[in-house]
Amino acid sequence: MKVSLSWLKEYVDLDIDVQGLAEALTMAGLEVEAVSGRFDYLESVIVGHVLSVEPHPNADKLTLCRLDIGDRQIQVVCGAPNVKSDMHVPVALPGTVLPDGTLLKKSVIRKMSSGGMICSEKELGLGADSSGIMVLESSSDVGKKLADTLDLNDFVIEIDLTPNRPDCLSIIGIAREVAGIENKSVKYPDYDLADSDNAIFDMTSVTIEAPDHCPGYCARLLTDITVGPSPFWLQDRLMSVGVRPINNIVDVTNFVMMETGQPLHAFDFDLLAENRIIVRTATGNETFTTLDNKERELNSDMLMICDGKKPVAVAGIMGGLDSEIKDSTKRILIESACFDPISVRKTSKKLGLNTEASHRFERGVDPLGTVKALNRAAILISEMDCGSLVGGIINECPVSIPEKTISLNINEVNRLLGIKPGPDQIKSMLEPVGFKVQIKNHETIDVIVPGFRVDVHRPQDIMEEIARISGYNNIQTTFPQIPAQAMVINRSVLIRNQIKNLMAGLGFAETINYSFVRKESCDYLRLGPDAPERNVVQILNPLTDDQSVMRTNMVPGLLETMARNISKQVQDIKIFEIGKCYFSKRPDTPANEIEILAGLWTGQRVQPSCQSKGIACDYYDIKGIVEGLLMSLNIIDAEFTANESPYTRPGHTALIRYQNKPLGLVGEAHPGVLDKYRLKQPAFIFELNLDTLIPLIPETVQATPIPKFPSTARDITLIIDTDIEAMDVINQGKKLNHELIEEIQLLDIYQGKPVPAGKKSILFRITYRSLTKTLEDDVINQLHKNIADKLIKNFNATVPV
């Protein structure tokens, strides 16, 4: 946003210089990027004294002027009809860049040298007169800079505004900020316009068919229009902020937009079919030619301003070629509206159109300022005698805009900001920038938010205003109170770090994958249609198609990491990951998050060497890793029971349980799953639900003394049905709960001759120990026989002959 200092002073009195103003605005949250002298281009334009004027020997309409410029005399070729000797005139020396971009050089014109240029008002950007050279007072000092002679001391301030401050996209908006900083009042222009009649309603109408996209639309009609150049003061104001003058009607609408922040648009009323306005969304396959003479394809989400038959403008962005103001225009309809910011933003992005109007509309304009801006434009056109106002104003507001009142607690302001302003002080801060403050008591005030502050919605926004206006640099630096007692770290964090260290000690490397996965991941895992993992959370705006849903399983990420490593010739991989899986419940409720530990092992268990051949890892390796991890976490006697899973190989999968609670699974990845990831070597995986596991980990460890008495072991071989799990036999033995049984260990499983078909032989070793005495063989033999008899009976087993 560019702000001319001279234009700003029309609305607020300034007691500080431009550098102090720039610093104050920056400290108030409006970062000033640059401050430049508006007339810096006149640095090499000086006052010259015309000593003589002679005809050009080679041109009838040119003259040769001898000029005194203070330190020397120069010759200038001039074509102005009003140049005379003894005049004081502005002389642009070589190197000057004129406002139209022309770089002045020393030149030869019709074989005569010219060491500068005598300029007109228009050429210097100081007026509209281009009929002849600019004549200065005879008392002007020869050789003095023109800017100093005419006291041209204006500055342009460039402000980098954040998107939440559309109210400052205007000169008056910046003036309000300055008023708040300087504790001054803003001098607003005249917005009041008394209508003698309502003749406009007999000549035109406005119909809003899309109130969600257009909360309000105002219009005024002017006749007897004379289109021509704007007066210099108006052109000068626009040029001071970088806006190119076009004609008096368009210049007025641009002037009001830069002054108030409310974009306006003028239509040629006689080019509007049926002389009326309809605000609607575009229809399917509709096209529209904008003012830049480009045909645009529209869709049904785009808001259009239409006449009785066709679109005439893209709402809030750009007008149409068929209704633009021309030299022949005699009647105009001026539009001042409030459009939905989201609608304008989407349309602007889809069409690739960014204009000064869309820049303001897509951030939000004051819904209560449309009539003021419209009246301001009508008054200016009337005062410039280039149009006659038709009585009445059309003000269509299908959507009511309630007044926003925010209750503010003074004590909360003091607590959060660290400053202690009272109610009266807060009122004096907020009212100069447009807020209305009602003091209820010494602790509470009500703040009425002005319509142009579309960014203020809650008490914290008001607190930010207080901090901003009082000055961030005036808030004292304080330090938080840090208790001497150290805070206790969350137990889950400690255990999670412990698990990571244990996995690293077991030879596994941690990997971190995206929580976003491809939507086909559930298909790759061969999950059924009713599997809980199918309840995925969809990403509304995914970065890529491979990251379109939130993961419900950690295995796809590990398999993709495996595939990436194998593609780089890394065949032996031991990796793990701790992360969350996300399960959708209902669209209006947050996803259910479960923390999972998953691991993968593929490749060699033992690397080949001169002493041994390489040995590939298998199911029992990954199972041993899980057992070692659980034992290190003091999870003793976890059960591994045969189970099935869609993404693991049948017969090579176990469900992990502890205290009758499922913890996860371990097994070999299914060949069909590996094929989806283009993997050819076996992979073994495990998953543990940390949300279930962590609460089961004991917080304290109980130590038992080393036994003083020796143990003794006995083996037992049973022939049982093949569908009976060895773990069931072990668990049954433990359930006997005899005080002398220390451990039951599986040594071997055998199927084949001489074991009958449908049977298998399992070999167990039972270790016995007493904590009080040495066991005698007779006692142990009898106990062992009793245990064997019970197991034989419970499992209908036999013993080898």
Image (cartoon, rainbow, N blue to C red):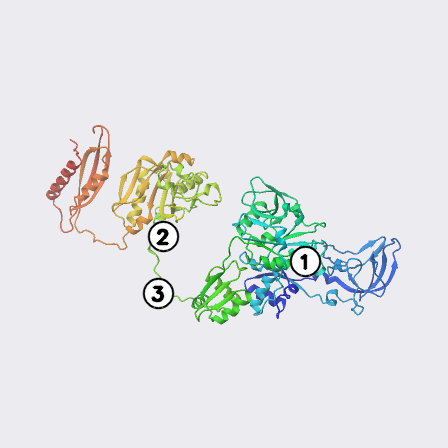
Pair 3/2: label in front? 3
Relative vertical location of residue 409 with respect to residue 63 in this rendering, above or below: below
Q: Which residue is mark 2?
A: 497
**Residue in front for this viewpoint, 104 or 275:** 275
**Residue in front for this viewpoint, 243 or 419:** 243
At which x and y percent is residue 636?
25, 47
At which x and y percent is residue 741?
17, 45
Mark toward the start of the polypeptide (1 vs 3): 1
* Mark 1–mark 3 distance (CA, rounded to whole Å): 73 Å
SS class of the residue under badge 2?
helix
Amino acid type of the residue tagged 2 in the rendering: Asn
* Mark 3–mark 2 distance (CA, rounded to whole Å): 23 Å
Residue at 57% x, 63% y is 26
SS class of the residue under badge 1?
helix
Pair 1/2: label in front? 1
At which x and y percent is residue 432?
55, 67
Amino acid type of the residue tagged 1 in the rendering: Ile
Amino acid type of the residue tagged 3 in the rendering: Gln
Label annotation for residue 381: 1
* Mark 1–mark 2 distance (CA, rounded to whole Å): 74 Å
**Residue in front for this viewpoint, 487 or 375:** 375
**In the image, is 491 to the left or to the right of 63?**
left
Q: Which residue is mark 3?
A: 485
Mark toward the start of the polypeptide (3 vs 2): 3
Relative vertical location of residue 675 with respect to residue 13 in this rendering, above or below: above
Q: Which image quarter is the C terminus in?
A: top left
Residue at 15% x, 46% y is 738
Q: Answer whether residue 329 is visible to the viewer in this image.
A: yes
**In the image, is 661 to the left or to the right of 594?**
left
Estimate how packed mark 1 is, as few (under 14), some (14 to 19) or many (20 or more) residues with alpha carbons within 10 Å. Answer: many
